Image (cartoon, rainbow, N blue to C red):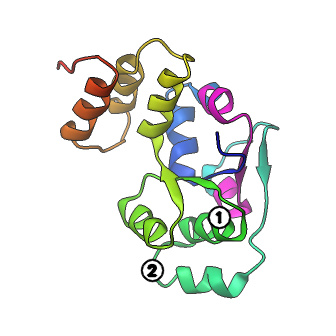
C-alpha cells in the first residue's frame, strides 16, 4: 500500500457525488491534495485529507503549459514526494503523469482496490452509481474491471 496518495479533483468529486467518500479513506487512510484541488472541489474536505502546497512553483508553471492549473498542481506535488500514488482520471493528465514515471490510478482503480481489500463485496453497484453521474468511461474498461472481479455487465 502506498504511504503517500495524492488526489486530483475528479476522484474527490466522483466519490462525493455517489456518496462513497468513505471508500477513499478505507482504501488509503490518508490523502494529500493541493489548495487548488480543494478549492475546485468546492466542499469542505474531511480532516483525513491533508492539504499541501507545491514548493516548486516554476515546475508547476511548466506543467500548466500542458494541463489545466489544478491537475498541474497535483502532478507537481507528486513529483516532490517519495514514491507517491496519484489519483487521476483525466486522460491527458494520466498520459503526462506516466511519462513522468508517476504511479497512477483513477476512480475505477480505487473501486477495484476496495474490492481486492475486501472493503466492498461487489464493484458493479458502485460502477452503476458512477454511470449515473457525468463520469465518462468506455464500456470496454468497465467490462474489464467487472470481469477482473468476476462480475458481468448488463444494461
Name the chief secondary structure element in magenta: helix
* Callout 1: SS: helix
User: Residue at position x 79%, y 60% from top?
Assistant: 52
Left or right side of 72 for 141: left
Height in image: 117 above or below 81? above
Query: Mark 2 — residue?
Result: 66
Observer-nearest of 74 and 46: 74
Residue 150 at what x, y percent from top left? 29, 17
* Callout 2: SS: loop
Graded by Cα atoms within 10 Å as few (under 14), some (14 to 19) or many (20 or more), the crowding at tag 1 reads: many
User: Residue at position x 60%, y 27% from top?
Assistant: 23
Residue 152 at what x, y percent from top left? 22, 18
Observer-nearest of 46 and 54: 54
The quarter holding residue 81 reads bottom right
Question: From the viewer's perspective, is the residue at label 2 or at label 1 nearer?
Answer: 1
Label 2 vs 1, first from the N-terminus: 2
Q: How many marks?
A: 2
Left or right side of 22 for 108: left
Q: Dividing the image into 4 quarters, which one contains the C terminus?
A: top left
The quarter holding residue 136 reads top left
Magenta segment: does it hold 9?
no
Query: Mark 1 — residue?
Result: 78
- Name the residue furthest top: 121
User: Residue at position x 72%, y 51% from top?
Assistant: 32
Left or right side of 22 for 96: left
Q: Dividing the image into 4 quarters, which one contains the N terminus?
A: top right
Residue 68 at what x, y percent from top left? 50, 72
- The dot on residue 93 is none
Residue 49 at what x, y percent from top left? 75, 43
**Residues under labels 2 and 1: Cα distance?**
16 Å
| Magenta-tinted stretch | 23-39
User: Residue at position x 62%, y 30% from top?
Assistant: 27
Amino acid at each position: 500500500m502506498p504511504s503517500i496518495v495524492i488526489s486530483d479533483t475528479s476522484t474527490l468529486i466522483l466519490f462525493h457525488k455517489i456518496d462513497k467518500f468513505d471508500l477513499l479513506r478505507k482504501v488509503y487512510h490518508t490523502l494529500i491534495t493541493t489548495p487548488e484541488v480543494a478549492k475546485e472541489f468546492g466542499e469542505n474536505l474531511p480532516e483525513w485529507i491533508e492539504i499541501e502546497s507545491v514548493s516548486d512553483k516554476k515546475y508547476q508553471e511548466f506543467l500548466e503549459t500542458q494541463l489545466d492549473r489544478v491537475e498541474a498542481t497535483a502532478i507537481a506535488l507528486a513529483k516532490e514526494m517519495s514514491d507517491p500514488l496519484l489519483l487521476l482520471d483525466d486522460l491527458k493528465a494520466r498520459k503526462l503523469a506516466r511519462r513522468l514515471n508517476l504511479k497512477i490510478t483513477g476512480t475505477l482503480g480505487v473501486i477495484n482496490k476496495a474490492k481486492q481489500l475486501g472493503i466492498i463485496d461487489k464493484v458493479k453497484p458502485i460502477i452503476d452509481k458512477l454511470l449515473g453521474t457525468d463520469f465518462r468511461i468506455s464500456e470496454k474498461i468497465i467490462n474489464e474491471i467487472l470481469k477482473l472481479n468476476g462480475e458481468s455487465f448488463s444494461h
